[in-house]
Image (cartoon, grey):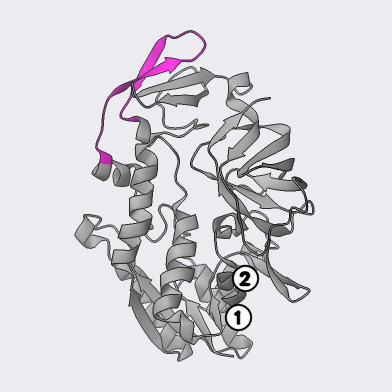
Amino acid sequence: MKRALLLSGGVDSSVALHLMMERGEEPDLFYIYIGADEEGFQDCPSEEDMEMVRWLAHHYGRPLEVINLHREYWDYVVQYIIDTVRVGHTPHPDMLCNRIIKFGYFNEYAGRDYDQIATGHYATKRIIKDKHYLATAVDALKDQTDFLAQITYPQLVKAHFPLGELPKSEVRCIASMAHLVTAQRKDSQGICFLGKVDYNQFIEKYLGTLSGNIVELETGKVVGEHRGYWFHTIGQRKGLGLSGGPWFVIRKDIETNTLYVSRGYDVETQYGNVVEMPEMHFITENPMAGDELDVTFKVRHTPDFTKGLLRRDGGIYTLHSEELIQGIAPGQFCTIYDTEKKICHGSGVIARGMRM
């Protein structure tokens, strides 16, 4: 079997390489280059990443190829981010990175010559009656199936996740014992592929700033000022600059550039129990035999699952939660799992959250 491995320069994909070599899988190595410098993000970590990747390729004696997906990334992922925040919604760029870039254009340009494309994602796969299913990782805290829930079935069939059965602590331990140059490297934080780039700086470059009022939802009192609704998301608590909190963003008025907030952890307006999605993307197959299905789900990246009932009415899907959930943000993805919290069926873009 011919295997490719996407290296990022981080500890996860490095240990994935180490494990594959130990198993005799000997992958060809690829690094996806985005090259953000010309877009004004000199802090993009690609140069440092490349040093790490070249060291790994030399250390394990494996061929390395750099695939330039700069234009595809900026045309599809960056444009998606900007379009989403401009209308006041919350984007999830990792979803698009995985479907369009890592398992999409990479496969089109290079991965199509391989039987498997391996990554450092924390996820597993199950094969049930000859069908492949995306499944959760052993490490619930690091599980990344909610970042992979928009990939297609052909992409899943080729995907290989060497880290899925390991806790993060063991991955770090393996890296140290193998004396990998990435062993102590911090996990990347920020926008997919842009590592150190600060999200708010990124958004400001494209949408600028526009002062607006922060209004207490219950009283209508102006309690502060913000720099633009596009910097904020429903359910957000940190970064509002308000005293006497905690304060949470409850609603955004795009027309007037106004943020509505409520104070306190148990404010009723923070919570909803119905998630509406215009459509659902199911990875392997639609698991709904009828118009209702018991599921577990997530509306944000978290180790916790919530029980609910997925309903279909025509082309509209609604998720009815068994408990109230905080901060349902339009634009984010609701990821659907089986009741055992093992199989990831897919995901849908949240249109709105409600309380019923």
Q: Given the image, on which type of amino acid does mark 2 rest?
A: Leu
Marks 2,1: beta carbons within 8 A: yes
For the residue pair 93 and 267, the one nearer the viewer reads as: 93
Residue 59: in sight, yes or no? yes
Question: Relative to 148, does residue 308 appear above or below in the rendering?
Answer: above
Distance from disc 2 to disc 1, alpha carbons, whole Å, reads: 8 Å
Question: Can you tell which mark lies on residue 163?
Answer: 2
What's the magenta region?
A: 207-228
As helix, strand or loop, the secondary structure at mark 1 comes to: helix
Question: Can you tell which mark lies on residue 298?
Answer: none
Q: Is residue 150 magenta?
A: no
Which residue: 58% across, 20% down? 264
* Residue 280 position within the rendered picture, expressed as x and y whole percent measured from the top left: 60, 50
Q: Earlier in the sequence, mark 2 or mark 1?
A: 1
For the residue pair 279 and 121, the one nearer the viewer reads as: 279
Answer with the quarter of the image where residue 276 lies. Answer: top right
For the residue pair 58 and 128, the one nearer the viewer reads as: 128
